[in-house]
Image (spheres, helix red, strand yellow):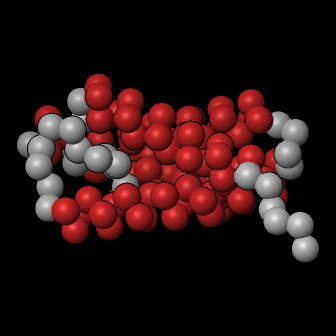
């Protein structure tokens, strides 16, 4: 349960991964990218522990579904604000969901070093 709540939280707070419509300061972009990539690494490892190495379709489905839930929470949180008009564009949403899902999947599929 914690894994999925964490995934919703990161997608709510870390959206958009990179805003294609508005210029942001470089430090804000770097901090957001670092947070989302580090969280994807943690979530990938947690999902590997939770689902094992054999259920790639389940990991992908869960990641996309909970990413969309996180984006819906973010949209409702900022409902009525001007920032929704330039944050929630199709390119930003697709970039965020695809990039986050790919990152989680890569970290889920990565092999641990042999000791």
Q: Is residue 19 left or right of residue 17?
A: left
Q: Identify the residue at horizontal 41%, vertical 64% (top origin).
A: 34
The quadrant in which residue 31 appears is bottom left
Q: Is residue 9 left or right of residue 65?
A: left
The quadrant in which residue 93 appears is top left
**Above or below, comparing residue 1 to residue 86 in the picture:** below
Q: Identify the residue at horizontal 73%, vertical 52% (top origin).
A: 110
Q: Position of residue 114 (x, y in %)?
A: 89, 67
Q: Given the current orientation, which residue lies at the most extreme right position?
A: 115
Residue 9 makes an appearance in the image: no
Residue nearest the viewer, comparing 69 with 104:
104
Q: Quadrant of the N terminus?
A: bottom right
**Above or below, comparing residue 65 to residue 8 in the picture:** above
**Above or below, comparing residue 18 to residue 62 in the picture:** below
Q: Position of residue 27 (x, y in %)?
A: 22, 68
Q: Identify the residue at horizontal 56%, vertical 40% (top origin).
A: 102
Q: Identify the residue at horizontal 55%, vertical 40% (top origin).
A: 101
Q: Is residue 56 left or right of residue 44?
A: right
Q: Position of residue 41 (x, y in %)?
A: 60, 59
Residue nearest the viewer, comparing 62 with 33:
33
Q: Given the current orientation, which residue lies at the most extreme bottom position?
A: 115
């Amino acid at each position: 349960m914690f894994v999925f709540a964490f995934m919703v939280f990161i997608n709510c707070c870390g959206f958009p991964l990179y805003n294609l419509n508005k210029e942001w300061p470089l430090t804000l972009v770097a901090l957001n990218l670092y947070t989302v990539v580090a969280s994807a690494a943690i979530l990938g490892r947690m999902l590997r522990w939770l689902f094992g190495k054999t259920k790639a379709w389940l990991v992908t489905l869960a990641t996309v579904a909970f990413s969309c839930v996180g984006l819906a929470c973010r949209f409702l949180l900022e409902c009525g604000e001007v920032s929704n008009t330039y944050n929630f564009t199709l390119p930003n949403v697709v970039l965020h969901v695809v990039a986050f899902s790919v990152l989680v999947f890569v970290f889920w599929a990565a092999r641990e070093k042999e000791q």
